[in-house]
Image (cartoon, rainbow, N blue to C red):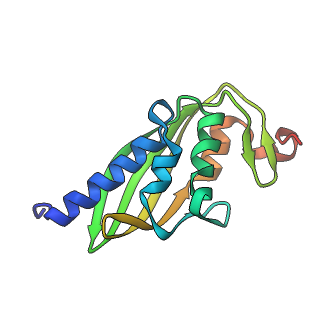
């Protein structure tokens, strides 16, 4: 394995800071959004939605409300030029309503450890694009609602 370049180390620090700002215990949505380039975006692949500007922070707030102890466990980083890929898990206890496009899942009190893969494109130390691939079926199974989504949704 080759040594990390200074650019890779810098890019890793940008991404680690972004995750830190998204964790419930250290959440700072405005600062999270400020880590993005002016034309940068966040793409929630599972929801099929891209967020720009201040909307980039909506999912940070949504997950922190549903999982007040939300934190990410970072497993591996991969680098190619200005692209950083991170394997991780989303972890927390479901104590608030989880708003989804189809409705809200009321708190189940269950823990999640949902696998996730994030792909970042960086430019000049800012995030130009962030594509998030959460294993939603696993997350929903961990909440106990996967096989009965209609009964689980409220509103």
Residue 76 rendering spot, x and y as whole percentages: 31, 52
**What residue sits 52% from the left and 35% below the top?**
70
Q: Nearer the viewer, residue 106 or 25?
A: 25
Q: Quadrant of residue 111?
A: top right
Is 128 located above or below residue 88 in the figure? Answer: below
Q: Percent x, y for residue 34?
A: 45, 55
Name of the residue lying farthest toward the left: 3
Quarter assignment of residue 92: top right
What residue sits 29% from the left and 62% below the top?
78
Direction from residue 13 to residue 95 in the image, left or right: right
Residue at the (37%, 62%) spot, across then down: 85
Residue 152's place in the image compared with 76, above or below, is above
Number of numbered discs visible in the structure rendering: 0
Classify the position of the N terminus by image quarter. bottom left
Q: Is residue 92 left or right of residue 109?
A: left
Q: Position of residue 88 (x, y in %)?
A: 42, 48
Image quarter hosting the C terminus: top right
Q: Is residue 60 above or below residue 50?
A: above
Q: Position of residue 120 (x, y in %)?
A: 41, 65
Residue at image point 66% right, 42% down: 141
Drawn side of residue 107 relative to residue 56, left or right = right
> Image check: 2 left or right of 62?
left
């Amino acid at each position: 394995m080759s040594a990390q370049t200074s650019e890779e180390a810098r890019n890793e620090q940008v991404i680690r800071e972004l995750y830190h700002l998204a964790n419930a215990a250290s959440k700072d949505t405005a600062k999270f959004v400020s880590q993005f380039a002016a034309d940068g975006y966040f793409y929630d692949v599972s929801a099929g939605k891209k967020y720009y500007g201040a909307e980039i922070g909506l999912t940070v707030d949504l997950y922190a409300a549903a999982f007040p102890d939300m934190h990410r466990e970072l497993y591996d980083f991969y680098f190619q030029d200005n692209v950083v890929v991170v394997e991780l898990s989303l972890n927390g206890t479901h104590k608030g309503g989880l708003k989804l496009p189809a409705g809200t899942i009321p708190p189940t009190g269950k823990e999640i450890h949902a696998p996730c893969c994030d792909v970042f494109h960086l430019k000049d130390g800012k995030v130009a694009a962030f594509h998030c691939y959460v294993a939603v079926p696993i997350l929903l199974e961990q909440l106990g609602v996967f096989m009965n989504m209609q009964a689980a949704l409220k509103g």
